[in-house]
Amino acid sequence: MPSMVEQLYARVLRPIVFQLPAETAHRLTLALLAGVPIGPCPHDPPELRTTLCGLELANPIGLAAGMDKEVKAAGAWQAMGFGFAEFGTITPRPQPGNPPPRMWRLPEHQALINRLGFPSAGMEAAARRLGGLRRAGLRMRVGVNIGPNRDTPRERVAADYALLMRTLGPLADFVVVNLSSPNTPGLREWQAPERMREIFAALRSDGPPARPILIKIAPDLEPPMLAQICGQALALGVSGIVATNTTIAREAVGVTASYEGGLSGRPLRERARAVIRDLYRHTHGKLPIIGVGGVAGAQDAYAHIRAGASAVELYTALVYGGPGLIGAIKAALAGLLRSDGLRSIGEAVGRDA
Ligand SMILES: Cc1cc2nc3c(=O)[nH]c(=O)nc-3n(C[C@H](O)[C@H](O)[C@H](O)COP(=O)(O)O)c2cc1C
């Protein structure tokens, strides 16, 4: 039974918000949410308490990158009940991203397509905001997702990541190296093992990083490439993998394929879960995985966890489900654990892999 907040969103707010073009609605919503002050965390069922890369989380549900690229609404994400939020992608220098229109809803599929291309206010602005969060008493865990500027030449890309790491790493609990946005030309090529080595050499040029570093990968990788990435990640001592970014595949949505960009939401769910399962198998459960793609309810989150994810993230479902969704997922997830006789999230991770 949906909560009152969920019903209010579905019946009143969403029909109004969906009258606006997707990006306008997003900008307005964020401006409103930015006004929510940092307050107490909602209560979480104790069995949802878990760890990710050595970090304690009050619950395993996180906000995916892209929703809050500029660290504007941390108070709202914490109040909604997220256990952590991944801000970004943040680039070193400010850049506008691709020309609009660049974001579309596909309501019949509970999906979005975007080709935003990393609009970013740059890392200095993000650093100022991140610095303020802990001082203001934010308790939720904070990740920063980093990526190179679009006009950075190939030979400077690793240096961009290193600069972002130096500037933003100390201000976050973990860092995600984004290797998989489909909207920055050439970015996905950095998933190749020799390119990953180049990036990690640069990231470690100042000594051992102070924070866990995860990589974020695409759902569109062929199985041999996925295996290679796992081998390289283990060899490099990568802290974990975020799987997955949006997909360039369109089988699941048919004719709406005409928009170019990354597809997210329900049509991505099974593909993302298959990638999570493969990653877990290839790494024998040694690398923590953040499972992301198509999570819209407790069953989805639980299935990603049972496939091998230590925590999950979502973006698109928040657009369709509204702010009551996170509390609903957490309550039902605790119930699912209990009905399977499990006492913690950790006990469920990888059970179906
Ligand atoms: C509008 C939009 C913008 C996004 N921007 C980013 C981004 O800047 N960096 C990133 O790593 N992922 C970005 N993503 C991908 C999400 O973090 C996530 O990996 C993907 O949407 C799948 O999750 P979902 O099905 O819950 O939305 C974006 C997704 C959407 C819909």
Image (cartoon, rainbow, N blue to C red):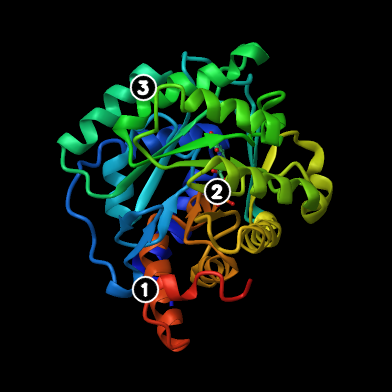
Q: Position of residue 259 (x, y in %)?
A: 75, 36
Of label 2 and label 1, which has the lower sequence position? Answer: 2
Q: Is mark 3 within 8 Å of ligand 1?
A: no
Left or right of 215, for residue 67: left
| Camera-nearest label, 1 or 3 | 3
Q: Can you give x and y, in whole percent of width and height, for residue 159 in the image?
A: 53, 17
Contact between labelled residues 3 and 1, with CB atoms less than 8 Å apart: no
- Crowding near the residue tagged with mark 1, few <14, some 14–19, many ≥20 C-alpha atoms within 10 Å: some
Near-viewer residue (198 or 22):
198
Q: Using the image as rendered, state which of residue 295 and residue 51 is in the foreground.
A: 51
**Is residue 329 in view from this perspective?**
yes
**Does 317 appear above or below 263?**
below
What's the residue type where badge 3 is placed? Thr
Among the 4 quarters of the image, the one containing residue 171: top left
Left or right? Give the position of 246 relative to 260.
left
Task: In the rendered structure, find residue 241 and report the number of the disc placed on it.
Answer: 2
Label 2 to label 1, Cα distance in Å?
A: 26 Å
Q: Whole-percent x and y of residue 205?
A: 46, 22
**Residue at the image point whose x is 76% and y is 45% from the top:** 225
Q: Which residue is mark 1?
A: 331
173 in relation to 326, above or below = above
